[in-house]
Amino acid sequence: MRQFVVIGRDVPIDPDAISLSDVPGAGRLDLLCRCVSAGVFLSHGIRESVRVHLVVADEFTVTFDSDTLRHLHPDERNVAARVRDALAAKADAIGHMPADVSPGVELRRMGLDATLDRLVGDDGRGPDGTLVHLHEEGDPLVDAEPPTDPVFVLSDHHDFADTEAAAIADRAERRLRVGPELLHADHTITVVHNWLDTDGYAEY
């Protein structure tokens, strides 16, 4: 299983504030939608065993599971509609029990800390995988061994806040960078997928 946790600070939690005619205007929701598409889609297909978790305003986490997704298309408007539907169902997310939005899409009443605890525990090596922090000051990706069941965490168009960086640092096994240039979050996910697809650029 490959998992990506993407922090989205400015996306409104009020679904009525999300216009499908202006997806970027909803706190750069367009970037998060592209992260979902980069995470779960292939050309003319969908990846197996991938989850993308969008942490919205440090209050809710919307999860897309590639193995159970149905009727999702890679365009921003379609993905944004699923995010809006998820936020509209937030009353059904009670405690840490998720609200089922549609096949393959869930919403949990969890911010970043709780989401990381659920995925990797408080030591970064939990039941679902090993936490890897994607950061411009990390070690080069090409020099690292691909981890088993990785959980990658990355930020939207903002830098990591101090509290976020601390929460990640407490749990991350390693910090990696994908290259010498700063990339958009969705492009970073594509590079990481290629790194894993090729077993660390060793097999083509």
Image (tube, rainbow, N blue to C red):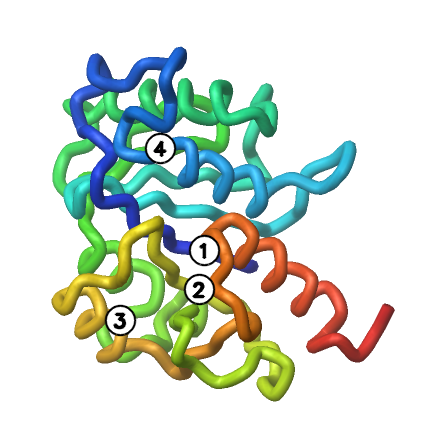
Residue 188 visible in the picture = yes
Q: Position of residue 23 (x, y in %)?
A: 38, 23
Of circles 4 and 1, the one toward us is: 4
Nearest the viewer among 22 and 131 is 22
Question: Mark 3 or mark 2, which is nearer the start of the sequence?
Answer: 2
The residue that appears at 46% across and 38% down in the rendered structure is: 64
Residue holding disc 1: 4
- Mark 1 secondary-structure assignment: strand
Q: Which residue does the numbered mark 3 point to in the structure image?
A: 168
Work out how far the residue at label 1 is from the one at label 3, CA to CA, in angstroms.
Answer: 13 Å
**Label 2 crowd (10 A; few <14 / some 14-19 / many >=20):** many
Neighbourhood count class around disc 1 (C-alpha, 10 Å): few under 14, some 14–19, many 20 upward: many
The Cα atoms of the two marked residues, 3 and 4, are separated by 22 Å
Q: Secondary structure at mark 3?
A: helix
Q: Is residue 82 above or below residue 163?
A: above
Dot in front, 3 or 4: 4
